[in-house]
Image (cartoon, grey):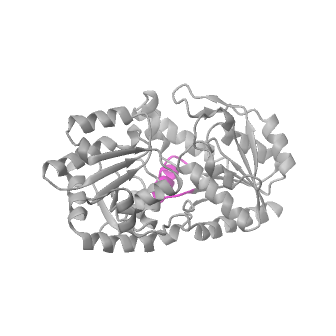
Amino acid sequence: MRIAIFTDTFWPQVNGVVRTITTLAQGLLSRGHEVAIFTIDVNKIKTQEISSVHRLNGQVQIYTFFSAASPWFKDIQLRFPTIVAPFSAARQFRPDIIHSQTSFGIGWDAVIVAKLLKCPLIGTHHGFLAEYLNNIKLDFDLPKRLMRRYLAFYFNRCDAVTTPCRALSRELLDHRLQRPLQVISNPLDMQHFSVNRTKAALRNKYRFTKPTLVHVGRLVAQKSIEVLIDAFARLVKRRIDADLVIIGEGRERPKIEALVHELAIKDSVIFTGLLTGNDLIERVAASDVFVSASTTEAQALAFLEAMALGLPAIGVRAGGVPEYVQHEKNGLVVAPHDPEALAQAMRRLIEDAALRKSYGACARAIVKAYEAGVVLDKLEALYQGLKEQRAH
């Protein structure tokens, strides 16, 4: 099949959606499909992280269209749909399926192109976007309700809809989604998340001498990192000997670093900045426990990737987290916004190496359900079914 993926985020941007699209495109290519990416003007994004797209170069046609920088975030490009250029490119590519990974700008290009080409359109909804309205000072009930209604309105323009977790599906259905809906995981490249060195060798390489907690993600308000810092500070004050490694970058970093200094835990907290590739994988594999206080995760790849490396996980009872962090099986789930509960969970796993090992082994087993091959089987079946329906 010929599959056109429409997305308003792509390399060199660094986030879970981009990694999902890259893994999806690679998997489809390996199965003999042709893939094209329709996206924003990535050349306007200034970042050093460009290596991962090279895995697709020469195999995937990448069409870029005019976009402009967001007034709120300099590394995000916004696009007002202008149908001529995307329609011309799509007509040249002749897709059998259009798969939209966004509900904004270029997502509407996907809707219009699909209608004009009489091509089946699948929409994938990736996250609890209403929770990000506080970035533009709209963290109120009415704007959030309107955002959720808008999202259902957009996905009602698709022939089929997928989400990576049940919690996200329920949110769409509660706000009048009427299209066929399936929960299909984001694909995880299990081969990519493995290491050749032993944990002892990796700990020696990175000088991890204490039980080590690790958090991976953008340093933004929605990740509730201040709750994590508060919880970890409680451990330090109780003389629990451990380190916390924070991997990622974001606009909240100065605020988080200031909190670390204020709580007098700077000697136990390591900020690595943005890591990718082997640097990221090895640093996580060298750690003992993955931890996050975020309440806005649908299906956080950082959780799944850590689980694939054999780490037990600690998360909060919100969003999609309880669907993949199974309490007392592969990790611990605590109440959201509760630093004391989070501290107790961290202490339990720090002090019990046997429990860490047991949960870590279970994490590896559970995460196999999210492996790219399993996910691609489901997506291929969905693509083929829609293609046959349209043919009739």
Q: Position of residue 361 (x, y in %)?
A: 38, 74
Quarter of the image where the N terminus is located: bottom right
Please state if 390 lies on the left or on the right of 338 as rendered.
right
User: Can you see residue 301?
Assistant: no
User: Can you see residue 229?
Assistant: yes
Determine the residue positioned at 39% across, 59% down.
205
Quarter of the image where the C terminus is located: bottom right
The foreground one among 67 and 102 is: 67
Q: Main secondary structure of the magenta part?
A: helix
Whether 84 is drawn above or below 356: the answer is above
Residue 249 falls in image quadrant: top left
Q: Position of residue 178 (x, y in %)?
A: 60, 52
Q: Position of residue 80 (x, y in %)?
A: 68, 31
Whether 153 is drawn above or below 354: the answer is above
Boundaries of the magenta span: 163-176
Residue furthest to the right: 92
Determine the residue positioned at 48% across, 53% down.
168
Please state if 187 lies on the left or on the right of 114 as rendered.
left
Please state if 81 lies on the left or on the right of 171 as rendered.
right
Number of numbered discs on residues = 0
Residue furthest to the top: 71
Whether 266 is drawn above or below 318: the answer is above
Please state if 240 lies on the left or on the right of 245 as rendered.
left
The foreground one among 152 and 356 is: 356
User: Is 166 inside the magenta-drawn segment?
Assistant: yes
Residue 97 falls in image quadrant: bottom right
Determine the residue positioned at 38% across, 73% down.
362
User: Is 253 inside the magenta-drawn segment?
Assistant: no
Determine the residue positioned at 46% across, 32% down.
143
